[in-house]
Image (tube, rainbow, N blue to C red):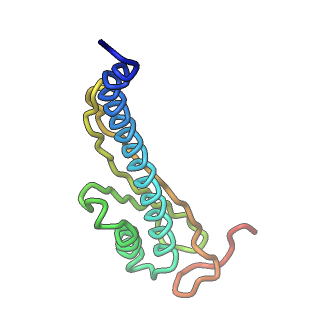
C-alpha cells in the first residue's frame, strides 16, 4: 500500500541532483565574475604604475603591478596575459589590457561548457606636468 510520502521519496534524488547542478552553475558564474574583477584591478594597477614610473622602467612597472594585483592563491599566473600599449611621454595615452581564460566544468545535462575569455582594459593619460619626461606640457591646449 502506498502512502502520500512515496512521491516525495521518488522526487528527492532528482531535486538533490538539480540543486547540485544549479550550485555548480552558480559557482561557474561566480568564477567568471571574480576573474573579471581581478582583470579590471590588474589593468588599473598596471596603467597607474606605467603613468607614475620613469620612462626607463614604465613597461616593467606596469606588468609587475598588474601581476601583483592578481591573487596567486585563486588564479594561476601563467594563464593571465598582460599587454601594455603606449609609450612614456607627456599627454600620451597608455592602455593596459589583462586577459585570462576561465575553464568551466562539464555539467550533467549540459555537456562540455568549454571556457570563458575574460578581458579588461584601462586607459590613462600621462600627466603633462610630470617630472622626468622630455617635451613640453601642451596637451589639451
The C terminus lies in quadrant: bottom right
Residue 119 placement (x, y as % from top left): 43, 49
* Residue lying at the far front of the rendered structure: 1
User: Residue 110 falls in which quadrant of the image?
Assistant: top left
Coordinates of residue 70 in the picture (x, y in percent): 37, 66
How far across and how far down the image is residue 38, in percent? 42, 60
Residue 60 occupies quadrant? bottom left
Using the image, determine if residue 23 lies above or below residue 62: above
Identify the residue at horizontal 47%, vertical 64% (top origin).
41
- Which residue is painted at 36% across and 69% down in the image? 63
Farthest residue, direction top: 1
Of 112 and 118, the residue lying toward us: 112
Q: Nearer the viewer, residue 139 or 70?
A: 70
Front residue of 115/20: it is 20
Q: Position of residue 82 (x, y in %)?
A: 36, 59
Against 10, residue 125 (above or below) is below
Q: Is residue 137 above or below residue 24?
A: below
What's the residue at 43%, 64% (across, down)?
Answer: 42
Position of residue 57 relative to residue 91, above or below, is below
Q: Quadrant of the N terminus?
A: top left
Q: Residue furthest right?
A: 141
Q: How many marks?
A: 0
Of residues 75 and 82, which is closer to you in this image?
75
Q: Is residue 130 left or right of residue 52?
A: right
Amino acid at each position: 500500500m502506498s502512502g502520500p510520502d512515496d512521491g516525495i521519496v521518488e522526487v528527492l534524488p532528482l531535486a538533490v541532483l538539480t540543486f547540485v547542478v544549479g550550485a555548480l552553475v552558480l559557482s561557474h558564474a561566480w568564477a567568471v565574475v571574480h576573474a573579471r574583477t581581478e582583470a579590471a584591478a590588474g589593468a588599473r594597477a598596471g596603467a597607474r604604475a606605467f603613468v607614475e614610473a620613469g620612462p626607463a622602467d614604465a613597461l616593467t612597472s606596469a606588468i609587475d603591478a598588474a601581476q601583483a594585483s592578481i591573487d596567486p592563491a585563486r588564479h594561476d599566473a601563467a594563464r593571465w596575459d598582460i599587454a601594455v600599449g603606449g609609450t612614456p611621454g607627456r599627454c600620451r595615452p597608455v592602455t593596459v589590457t589583462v586577459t585570462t581564460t576561465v575553464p568551466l566544468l562539464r555539467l550533467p545535462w549540459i555537456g562540455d561548457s568549454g571556457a570563458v575569455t575574460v578581458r579588461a582594459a584601462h586607459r590613462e593619460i600621462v600627466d603633462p606636468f610630470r617630472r622626468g619626461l622630455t617635451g613640453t606640457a601642451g596637451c589639451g591646449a
